[in-house]
Image (tube, grey):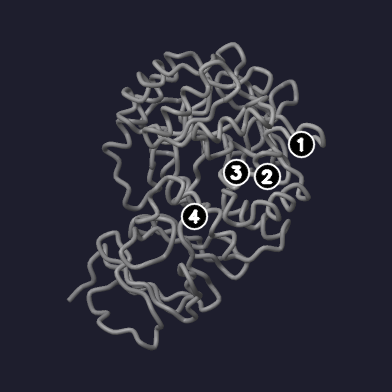
Amino acid sequence: MPAKVNHILLKGIQIYTEDKIIQNGYIKIKDQKIVELGLTDELKNVEEYEMIEISSQYKAIPGFIDVHIHGVNGADVMDATPEALENMTAALPKEGTTSFLATTMTQEKAEIETALINAGKFIETQSTEGSAEILGIHLEGPFVNKKRAGAQPIEHIIDPDLSLFKKWQDLSKGNIKLVTLAPERPGGLELIRYLKENGVIASIGHTDAAYEEVITAIDAGANHVTHLFNQMRGLHHREPGVAGAALLRDELIAEMIVDGVHVRPEMIELAYKLKRKEGLILITDSMRAKCLKNGQYDLGGQQVNVRDGKAFLDDGTLAGSILRLGDAVKNFLTFTGCSLEDAIEMTSVNPAKQLNIYDRKGSIAEGKDADIVILDDQLEVYMTICRGKVAFKKEEI
């Protein structure tokens, strides 16, 4: 009986499960799901599977989930076309990302609305098998603080507006899953309470809030911090600020851009020591120039200059990143000395739990989506499987 295309058997590999590492293990994948895993020595009933034998030095880990990404490979969510999103879903498996939140940015209301409508339609009809899955939308701006705009165009920043958010959520077909906002601005706490009541993550970001204002936001329902240390009130010994609150309060899960540019390695190590593996999520915050050459690119109508792994506006402001999530993992291991198991928590487990989808994503376990990354002996992405289909395989030299 010939193997069915959607029946795959990975064999002879190290498997990082939820509670242990299986040496010389196997994973059976059927109809987009993980149906069985165990020791290769105990493998039975393989006739209906396409067998993929892999080096025993290679590691199978859960697919990465990027909750904050604007673009890649020349495409951006704000392009507001299905082709742009198709491009992103095809390109991201190369870095180990199997699902993500399509992230918007501050722009004119009409442009945001067009992007939300486009993403909402795409999510409803997307073919996730063999490409990265868009899990929802991350609305970054325009409800932020002009003092901490960063690369968010300041002329389009507005105060949090509950009625406008409700309209936008309708336009997106209910797909906005995470909102970055400044809680200290008028309307901020009202919006946070509404988001909490309706199962949307309220994230504190691009904000000049003082420590006490962050505590008030936590009490209102905020439980997430957008790119820790970047575009927020920093840590001071008489005013802990947003950064201090993020480090101290376990209610807050903090994103980090671990490229060594946005945050110094020493601060990344400090955050890891205080927040531990449970309190951090690695993100890219990448823009369209990722995977492309040095040059000039567009970000929200602004010119971005990309040189030597860094993206800047003309005034020198950092403008997102060109970081690959697989590289973020390697950087984090280098900067902190943490285990690969801890890194998996921060790239797969925590984002899945934060998005309330851990029942189907975020770990290698029977019954879950077959979103799997194979790392080689140098921890480079060798193969990525999205919903049971090989979406990327590194070419042999």
- The answer to whether 25 is drawn above or below residue 246 in the figure is below
Gap between marks 4 and 1, in whole Å?
Answer: 28 Å
Residue at which label 3 appears: 254
The residue depicted at 44 percent of the width and 20 percent of the height is 112
Place of residue 339 in the rendered image (x, y in percent of width and height, measured from the top left): 63, 66
Dot 1 surroundings within 10 Å: few (below 14), some, or many (20 or more)?
some
Earlier in the chain: of badge 4 and badge 2, it is: 2
Residue kind at label 3, given as amino acid type: Ala
Gap between marks 2 and 1, in whole Å?
Answer: 10 Å
Residue at which label 2 appears: 247
- Helix, strand or loop status at disc 4: helix
Regarding residue 31, the answer to whether it shows in the image is yes
Place of residue 242 in the rendered image (x, y in percent of width and height, measured from the top left): 67, 34
Gap between marks 4 and 2, in whole Å?
Answer: 21 Å
Identity of the residue furthest to the right in this view: 237
Identity of the residue furthest to the top in this view: 155
Earlier in the chain: of badge 4 and badge 1, it is: 1
Q: Do the numbered discs 2 and 1 sit on residues whose CB atoms are within 8 Å? A: yes
Q: In this figure, what is the number of numbered marks?
A: 4
The residue depicted at 49 percent of the width and 80 percent of the height is 23
Residue at which label 1 appears: 235
Residue at which label 4 appears: 348
- The answer to whether 204 is drawn above or below residue 96 in the figure is above
Mark number displayed over residue 350: none
Dot 4 surroundings within 10 Å: few (below 14), some, or many (20 or more)?
many
